[in-house]
Amino acid sequence: MADPVKIRVLIVDDIQETRENIRRMLQFDSSIDIIGEARTGREAIDQSHSLLPDVVIMDINMPDMDGLVATEAIRKRLPYIQIIILSVQYDSSYMRRAMLAGARDFLSKPPMIDELTNAIRQAGKLAIEEKRKAEVNFATLEAASSSVAGQRILGKIIVVYSPKGGTGCTTIATNVALGLQSESTRTALIDASLQFGDVAVFLNEQGRNTILDLTPRADELDPDIIQEVMIKHPATQLDILAAPPRPEFADDVNSDDFSKVVRYLQRLYSFIVIDTSSYLSDVTQVCLDIANVIILVATQDIPSIKSTNLFLGLSDASGINRKRILFVINQFDKRISISAERIGESLKQPVEAIIPFEDRIVTSSINRGTPFITENKMLPISRSIFAVIDKITEKLEEQFQEESAAQVANRY
Ligand SMILES: Nc1ncnc2c1ncn2[C@@H]1O[C@H](COP(=O)(O)OP(=O)(O)OP(=O)(O)O)[C@@H](O)[C@H]1O
Ligand SMILES: [Mg+2]
């Protein structure tokens, strides 16, 4: 029987001799179990997904993909996996890049045997702890990705809305989209705040194509046109559809064309995250109508609670099922006497996630155009975004179960 405390290690290097040397160094260590080898970055990502190692020993220079890019991709999907980079280049800029990619450790090549086993033991301990913490979350994500739409999630629309401006929709939309984006769950972020949309600014990507390059062609879309117009966020591969360049162009986007564009994108992406503005324009209403999940954002103040109450009344009247609503309190400060429970009770809509007030982190991440979730996944505010993502997958799973049950019932 496998020893449950053994550290599961994957070795990644394009040179067979190097892989064998590492294997030899580790073969007599009873706390380490070498579960696989990969020769390319692509293989490293695939094997990490299928073999679920605790620790990956990663080369940097590989023919298909830089080991740092592979590191980032692995950590994005399975953040508990700890990665040790082995490199002949041992300078500070490489180390910095490795740390930014989410690597745990950096050793020069060839490593000393003690150095390598110590690094693996430390990384393994952390991975096993992190895995335990994350187990419930992964179970939810796996369940959602295996059951929603058969093998994989396709075309799920997540709309971020608040009836009061400035509560944090754009902050939440950008960070949630980045948290959802991965190679296996490609994600698009649409800025439907058409007058003063600032999604592109939040991601430091400005001045190129916008939604106005797609809506006039809404009836003749094809994947090439979409790829031409979407702005690819280089660090994460998230695709962004920016708002028009000037507020007076907002009216040029009609809601029918907008809806056609989103419907088309559903075929190409696993998730489509839409940022909206408070004003209930035709486009915003279309977004709310077609959303699988509406992230409804409020803050702990009376104007926000009052507006949320009015919005819920309106959404009830227009037939939006409250189960589709994921009610989030942003800028949460426990020193403010209005608790999340009280807000939930008074609005008859439970608060399902809380995002803390983190003035310095949020403002500086916006000003630098680097969302906090890409900078540091371990910050409490980043963790709160992952908690929102878990709730999204829970809701999608719930909807899938209900739809399946309804289909079965219809058959009889
Ligand atoms: N969790 C948070 N902690 C601290 N400040 C925050 C938080 N979330 C957002 N903010 C701040 O609130 C302001 C508004 O955020 P954001 O632009 O995301 O809101 P919005 O709802 O999209 O606004 P708008 O109505 O203008 O579109 C920003 O200055 C941002 O720094
Ligand atoms: Mg906004």
Image: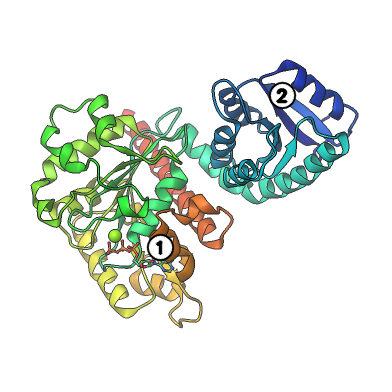
Residue at the image point whose x is 66% and y is 20% from the top: 14
Q: Amino acid at mark 2?
A: Gly
Residue at the image point whose x is 51% and y is 61% from the top: 381
Packing grade of label 1 (10 A; few <14, some 14-19, many >=20) is many
Do tag 1 and tag 2 residues touch (Cβ < 8 Å)?
A: no
Quadrant (top left/top right/bottom left/bottom right) for the N terminus: top right
Q: Does the image show residue 376?
A: yes
Per the image, the residue denoted by label 1 is: 328
Q: Is residue 146 left or right of residue 203?
A: right
* Residue 38 image point, x, y percent: 66, 22
Q: Is residue 376 left or right of residue 217?
A: right
Numbered label attached to residue 94: none
* Residue 285 image point, x, y percent: 18, 53
Q: Is residue 290 left or right of residue 83?
A: left
Per the image, the residue denoted by label 2 is: 36
Mark 1 secondary-structure assignment:
strand
Residue at the image point whose x is 70% and y is 45% from the top: 127
The image quarter in which residue 40 lies: top right
Nearest to the observer: residue 398 or residue 146? 146
